[in-house]
Image: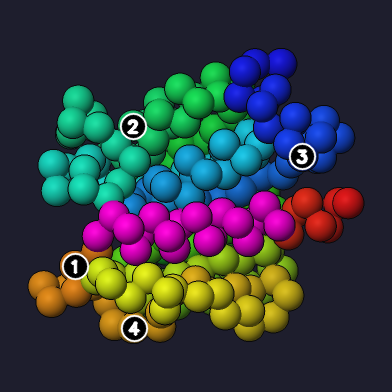
Amino acid sequence: MNHTLHGIASHIGAPALARLYRVRVGIAGCGGLGSNCAMHLVRSGFASLVLCDHDSVEASNLNRQFFFARQIGQPKTHALAENLRAINPELHLRLEHRALTPQSAAEVFADCDAVVECLDEAEAKAMLAEALLPRGVFYVGASGIAGCGGNDAIVIRSVRPDLHIVGDGGDEAGPDVPPLSPGVGIAAAKQAGLVLAHFLKEHA
């Protein structure tokens, strides 16, 4: 057992860690939410992730996303995989460097037990939910995480047992409410916390 896993097992116990190892989580979008959420999931004991994003790392991403300057120009999926394996080298990662459509979403996340929606546009969020929710997958979305100073407004709305939305319910990010690291980080941690709590409780 590597150092990361040993530390996790000391907190949640080896049986619980073994159960988390069998769960596969899909990350739809590897930007601010997705990269940070994936980092929290790996630090919590999850070891099987599907990372999907069609973009590459840009300099403007470094203020809030789990990437580094040396990774500018790399596909986000590949850069994120490198960073996650620096935490736990024993991860099982599937990298999907492509855009999501209703057809590809169902294919990409077909074998996932949970999917975390970390997309930017409202249309893409709606498309992913419509493609995946009928399958009964545990689904965690996001709505309204931009700006600063209103971090207490970032809350969890539980629509039903398998559907939760994190955010303040506000508008999409824009010039007046840019996505900034504190708010993005809080929302990403809450998304990861929902997934962790669900699978620890479900298999307790």
Q: Nearer the viewer, mark 4 or mark 2?
A: 4
Among the two numbered marks 4 and 2 on one chain, the one whose residue lies closer to the N terminus? 2
Give residue 176's position: percent from left, percent from top.
Answer: 13, 77
Type of amino acid at the residue the image marks with label 1: Pro
Among the two numbered marks 2 and 3 on one chain, the one whose residue lies closer to the N terminus? 3
| Range drawn in magenta | 180-197
Pointer 1: what residue? 178
Q: How much space separates mark 3 and mark 4, taking CA atoms?
A: 35 Å
Q: Is residue 47 above or below residue 198?
A: above
Type of amino acid at the residue the image marks with label 2: Ala
Instruction: State yes or no: residue 140 in magenta.
Output: no
Pointer 2: what residue? 79
Type of amino acid at the residue the image marks with label 4: Gly
Give the dominant element type of the magenta stretch: helix, strand or loop: helix
Among the two numbered marks 1 and 3 on one chain, the one whose residue lies closer to the N terminus? 3
- Residue 53 shows in the view: yes
Q: Is residue 5 above or below residue 23?
A: above
Does the CB distance between marks 2 and 1 fall below 8 Å?
no
Pointer 3: what residue? 12
Give residue 146's position: percent from left, percent from top.
Answer: 28, 70
Q: Secondary structure at mark 1?
A: loop
Pointer 4: what residue? 170
Q: Secondary structure at mark 2?
A: helix
Q: Nearer the viewer, mark 2 or mark 1?
A: 1
Q: Secondary structure at mark 3?
A: helix
Tag shown at residue 142: none
Q: Secondary structure at mark 4?
A: loop
Q: Is residue 72 left or right of residue 168?
A: left
